[in-house]
Image (cartoon, rainbow, N blue to C red):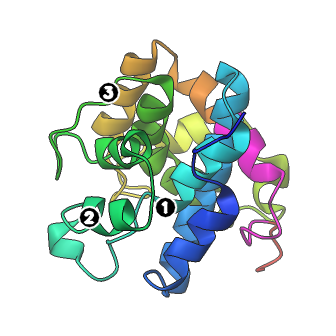
Amino acid sequence: MENNHLTLARARELNAGMVTEDHLLLHELNVCYAMGAMAQHFGGDVEHWQAIGMLHDYDYERYPEEHLQHTAEPLRAAGVSEEDIRAILSHGYGICSDVEPLTDLEKSLFTVDELTGIIQACARMRPNGILDLEVKSFMKKFKDKHFAAKCDRELILKGCAMLNMELRDVAEICIAGMREHAAELQLTGGGG
């Protein structure tokens, strides 16, 4: 059976020409690995969900004010499927896109995009990074509106509601998914 879904290798290739800033690459990796964990939870194709996570901010670096308006055409031209393009566009629902997240993949991307920002910030403050980050600590920081203030908590909660899941459960899945790649995500603590 031929799989016309995006592969992680292809997503990295497509990103290479568009995303060059370290903090954006790191964010995409965080989302990528959190999406892989969500795929496992939902019984989805892990690499495919990771690839969507990797590519979700494809046009952000070049067009921060017009995010997602320069995504569909170039990806379509590169042979990315309509289904995958739709998934990517849906993470901006209500902000810079009117594509509503409908599938588990789309709802997960919508939720983890902001959620990984808070997880990353929590992990960075700990001596052992994400290696021993517990959901309890995350929940405490989530409630503190001044911590990682740029991360939209309302949006995260809206995403959890779409998924019919509790915030702590989604966070636990994402932390576990990111922990497996702690070194690559620079979340092993010790200032690294």
Q: Marks 2 and 3: which is nearer the front? A: 2
- Residue flagged by tag 2: what amino acid is it? Glu
- Residue flagged by tag 3: what amino acid is it? Lys
- Is label 3 in a helix, a strand or a loop? helix
Q: Residue at x 30, y 37 (%)?
A: 155
| Residue range (magenta) | 172-187
Rounded to the nearest angstrom, the CA distance separating label 2 from label 3 is: 28 Å
Quarter residue 28 falls in: bottom right
Rounded to the nearest angstrom, the CA distance separating label 2 from label 1 is: 14 Å
The quarter of the image holding the C terminus is bottom right
Q: Which disc number belongs to residue 158?
A: 3
Q: Residue at x 74, y 72 (%)?
A: 186
Q: Earlier in the sequence, mark 1 or mark 3?
A: 1
Quickly name the residue at label 1.
Answer: 55
CB contact under 8 Å: marks 2 and 1: no
Count neighbours of disc 3 (C-alpha within 10 A) and say few if under 14, some if 14 to 19, many if 20 or more: some
Residue 75 is a magenta residue: no
Quickly name the residue at label 2.
Answer: 73
Q: Which disc number belongs to residue 21?
A: none
- Residue flagged by tag 1: what amino acid is it? Leu
Count neighbours of disc 2 (C-alpha within 10 A) and say few if under 14, some if 14 to 19, many if 20 or more: few
Q: Where does the image place residue 121, in percent across and percent down from the top left?
A: 56, 61
Rounded to the nearest angstrom, the CA distance separating label 1 from label 3 is: 22 Å
- Is label 2 in a helix, a strand or a loop? helix
Q: Residue at x 74, y 61 (%)?
A: 126
